[in-house]
Image (cartoon, rainbow, N blue to C red):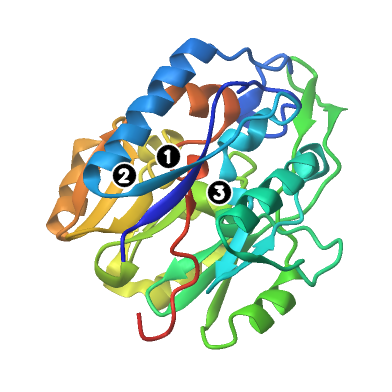
Amino acid sequence: MTPAVVMGDPEYFAVLHGSNPHTRTRWGARKRVDRDLAKRQWAVFADQLRSSGVEVHVLPPSPDCPGLVYPANAGILQGRTFYPANLLPARAPERPHYERFFSGLGYDVTPFAGGRVRFEGEADFFPWGDRMIFTHGPLKRQRTVLTWQFPFYKRVYGFRSDRRALDVLKTITPQREIVDLELCDERYYHGDTCLCSFGPRRERLLAYLPALTRASQEKLRALAADRLVALSDADAACYAANAFAAEIDRPHLFMTGAASEELRRRIGEAGVEMVTVDVSEFLKKGGGSVKCMVFDLAGVPSPQA
């Protein structure tokens, strides 16, 4: 089966709401995107995927939804069914675009049964070997609050998926164990910003452990054992974990070119072909790197896959 992804056309890419810590300056102002640079980086990335054997479906742009360039939180796939995510209010207008697009690709669109329970798709729910990982963290009203440190105020962001979504996910994927992990560092607001399964059968795991609570760190260490590749602070900061794993002729990993040589060596030793990608404008201004920019149409694999 040919690997395939959805990417969002960057024609209107901008920071509209500033909903994660990467989108604002130290002073709280929303960052301005160099759209020409972003378009060039997007085009090169799309070409790299295609030349490696990945089929790319392009989601049309909308001037009212500049976040469509980050479709990883559009929802999840189970077989031929697409479950749209219950997105952060600032990005909720994206949902109809995703629903129309996936319907056009031939998928059945079924509402996520959690009602208003926040859940942001495969950005927080993705395969790891025979298991699925589900990440979540405290939901907070995004706002500016006073502090005792200069500049005497800071922005509160919170996380994106509610732990209560786990009950619904268990009904969607009853055949797979779900590993429940809690996030604790707002810079890593989705699980795919600090965790990435990769390699044969995606049994190995890149992980920035400080982004998880202590209890979740201990759980992950116990489950992963020698399959865990712990990331340094520097590799985590450049979003090395926000990578896209694909099985083509052999396991591939599309990852930021800012990753350290040591990390690249360890990935190569795992029998994985690494493709380095430069999407720095998307990370520095919008808070999303390689994996944020693709929705993996492989969806949730069957237990036999």
Q: Is residue 40 above or below residue 141?
A: above
Q: Measuring 70% from the left and 49% from the top, which residue is drawn there?
A: 159
Where residue 290 is drawn, which disc sits there? 1
Q: Tell me the distance, in whole angstroms, between the alpha carbons under discs 2 and 1.
A: 7 Å
Q: Residues within 10 Å of mark 2 (few under 14, many from 20)?
A: many
Left or right of residue 7: residue 157: right
Which amino acid type is marked by label 1? Answer: Val
Q: Is residue 216 above or below residue 37?
A: below
Q: Which of the 4 quarters of the picture holds residue 21?
A: top right
Which amino acid type is marked by label 3? Answer: Ala
Q: Measuring 42% from the left and 85% from the top, which residue is drawn there?
A: 303
The front one of 135 and 90 is: 90
Residue position for label 2: 254
The front one of 53 and 187 is: 53
Q: Is residue 283 above or below residue 170?
A: above
The front one of 170 and 35 is: 35
